[in-house]
Amino acid sequence: MSRLSRSLSLAAVSLAALVAAQGGAHAGAFGIREQSATAQGLSFAGAASGSGHLSSMFWNPAVITMMPGWNTEASLSLIVPRVDINPLPSVPTFAFGASGDIGQDAIVPASYNSYQINDMLWVGLSTTSPYGLVTDPRDNWAGQVYSRSSKVFSLNVNPVLGIKVNDWLSVAAGPSLQYFDIRLKRAAAVTPGAPSVILDGDDIGFGFTAGVTLTPFAGTSIGIGYRSRIDHELEGTVTAPGSRIPISSDLTTPDQLTIGISQAITPALTVHAGFEWTNWSVLETPLVTGPGGVVVTDLPLNYDDGYFYSLGFDYRLNNQWTLRAGVAYEESPIDTEVRSTRLPDNDRIWASIGASYQWNDKLSFDVAYTHIFAKETDIRILPGHQDYEGLPFVADVDSSVDIVSVGLRYRWDNPAVAIPAAPIVRKY
């Protein structure tokens, strides 16, 4: 099989896997952070500076210049959330009961490929699912007029070109094509067994990614990566009892800035740190319009921006085993003022462990486990809340998340026949 046909086969497999995936939102709001088994073992500390090996290109495409030769990395993450919404006795529909566990288990795949053309140029391709959400309470429950099932799905394909400018500076950028699909259900009435109102729509949008890596000193790596916002003009329908209306809505997924630093302390020990800003406030309140541009409804989001701070380390035991661990604190873009029954998100702490096994000079395996501790959370849909529709709803939320990721890395060319390194260019 030729190199080109093998690369196309890998891309096809990645796309097929992603189309089959259901996403679980675990990066604040409906974002998905689980894009790398290696970086997950560090709670994504240093993801932009290369701690996730090739999969770090999700956060910073310039890391592909750290990967000599022809490489593939793939991961699968099993997300197991537990989210129970328990209405308080003061809720008029309290007798209808709690939501049950609205969290749905999800498998999120991701795939990355890079090819070194010469000592200065690399090309790469990633296929990921950066946004996703599946929540599904019982059909008849106390908050059914505010939500039944919710689903968000995305597929992103991102080719990149990387340039190693000199021995301490690399840059990369590439276009990003994204499919986005949303489907939301709620009860048409308070009564048990009431039919559902369903809104669904999808679209393909375009954006870009860009990044830079700096290695100012031996053992120090700094990375800055940017994923642009992507505008979607969703086309779909609103289905209610006895009617079906074609609709459209403009929705923008947020841009994201990630900064990472990795510092070798000893030949075996490396410490990583990371910071991530996600511009969730760009969502605002998308209007849903029907024929003739008439406003049918809206999607009140009005999130704040999200922030993520992480710290971790990896330790190379020997030529085969590397162990890693990390912690992170996430400031959710959702607070009590806008928190809904669809997405009862809140600030949380990530705790992760992971390991890598180098099978031979071409093949290695990764595994990671994360537990997410959510801050005590409540829902207060009362007069003045953006979701309020005349029915007060007050509840406590009990939630936690477990994530298990597995990955593999493979180098297709012969590591013993490497392309010569770029010539050293002094900074001063």
Image (spheres, helix red, strand yellow):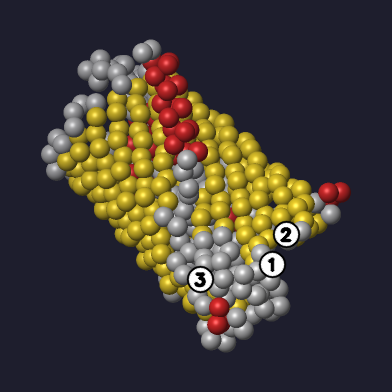
Q: Is residue 12 above or below residue 354?
A: above
Coordinates of residue 98 in the picture (x, y in percent): 50, 75
Label 2 neighbour load within 10 Å: few <14, some 14-19, many 20+? some
Q: Secondary structure at mark 2?
A: strand
- Mark 1 / mark 3, whichever is N-terminal: 3
Q: Residue at x 77, y 56 (%)?
A: 243
Residue 240: assigned label: 2
Residues 241 and 402: in front is 241
Instruction: Tell me, yes or no, whether the two marked residues, 3 and 2, touch with CB atoms within 8 Å.
Output: no
Q: Is residue 170 left or right of residue 187?
A: left
Q: Quadrant of the C terminus?
A: top left
Residue 99: assigned label: 3
Q: Residue at x 59, y 39 (%)?
A: 179
Coordinates of residue 87 in the picture (x, y in percent): 52, 79
Which quadrant would residue 321 be assigned to in this image? top left
Which residue, as the protein is rendered here, is positioned at the far bottom?
Answer: 90
